[in-house]
Image: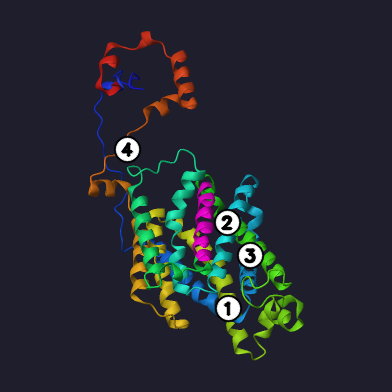
Amino acid sequence: FLDDFDADGKSLGDMDVTCIPNPEAAERNMLSIGFIWPRALLLGCSLLYGTNFPLGSIMNDALPASATTSGRMLLAAVALSPFLLKLKPELAKNAMIGGSFCSLGYLSQSVALLDVPAATVAFLGALVVIVTPVVNVLLGKDVKMGWRDAPQTWAAAILCLIGVGTLELGGGEGLGALGWGDMWAILQAIGFGTAFFFTEGMMARNPGQALPITAVQVGMTALFAGLWASLDGFGLLGTFGGDNGAWLLEEGTRAHYAIPGLFTSAFSGDDTLRTVALAAGWTGLITTAANRVGETTALGKVSSSEASVLLATEPLWAALFASLWIGDEFGPQDIVGGGLIVTACLLSSVKAETLRDIFGIEEPEEEVEEVLMDPAFAAAAALMAETVDPSTLSSKDSDSDSFQ
């Protein structure tokens, strides 16, 4: 366009260009309500998520884990059901796949809470900081995850693994301290991390579909939780998930453990059932349904890297609530291991350029050949070659530094 002429006949290429500040790009005021409220909302979501772990442990001590998980997810699914019909049809497949992995995370978390302290389950769940980039490499396209490409991911992974090792093996019992509960706690990170991959892909192309996608994921979790409750309730899973199998075959337990009996029984004077009913209502409606809506809303105002820093405080809140509500005690290895895992979460949000500058890492070389071989690029170049007449280009154009 530099060969175009203005109204006075002067070539635009010969005109001086002056950059002026954009008056609309005002400096960010960190004390403004617009800056504070989305970050406060994310921090509040992280705090509320932290209550899931001790409350889940309380519910599993009183009722079968399958019954409490199914009831909680059913409440959340009903609350989000109005958004289901707003999902774009082309997103249904990936939303259901992501929801299946999301259900794996929630169900594994519930099983892990039967044998593992609530705070430990929360810290092991933070392994998602490793799972997510690994899934991106395995399932993503053209994802570069070398040391020079993503040093923050590798540094976070190393710290996270050291933290897990300290948390699990630092008590003096060595590998003998590991159990199936720990494996289920790690599996929750695999479920959630894979779900994040599918969710991120859908949201990148359809940012307005956050609530319908969330509704599908919660609905899929409720479906699998209901299937688990049915199999467990009829005694088909033995002692898996607790010692209260076949609870649907007995009228007394069926009336108290399933919805709506759980909530009607809460008013009968049984303090234990009242506590469980309140916990189920809280985790279903507040920390699952409402919290997901709040998180989605805040992510529209805050970058994902900054959001991950605020949400990385979840294990700390879980440890605090577990100590206050169910009396979990922490040894030195729990504090050190948990601290390393949380640090890894924070480190994963640091920009790659920052770590390259700190450690003197060279920037990855751009693969120009791949760009030139791209079909879209080749088609555009061919079109330009057909439509541009070389004789119309002046010698100034060929000699100008702007075209080097």
Above or below 306: residue 93:
above
| Residue 364: mark | 4
Q: Does 188 lie within the magenta span?
A: yes
140 and 246: which one is in front? 246
Residue at 31%, 51% (x, y): give it: 26
Q: Mark 2 points at which residue?
A: 101
Residue 33 makes an appearance in the image: no
Quarter of the image that includes the N terminus = top left
Rounded to the nearest angstrom, the CA distance separating label 4 from label 3 is 45 Å
**Residue 229 x %, y %:** 68, 69
The amino acid beneath tag 3 is Ala
Residue marked by disc 1: 59
**Residue 160: x %, y % from top left:** 38, 59
Q: Which of 92 and 3 is in front in this view?
A: 92
Q: What residue do we see at 62% from left, 79% from top?
A: 63
* Secondary structure predominantly adopted by residues drawn in magenta: helix
Which element is circle 1 on? helix
User: Mark 1 touching mark 2, by CB under 8 A?
Assistant: no
Which residue does the numbered mark 3 point to in the structure image? 77
Examine the rendered structure and indicate whether residue 325 appears above or below residue 334.
Answer: below
Q: CB under 8 Å between callouts 2 and 4?
A: no
The 10 Å Cα crowd at callout 1, few under 14, some 14 to 19, many 20 or more, is: many
Q: Which of marks 2 and 3 is nearer the N terminus?
A: 3
Q: Is residue 122 visible?
A: yes
Q: What stretch is highlighted in magenta?
A: 183-201
Quarter of image, res 329: bottom left
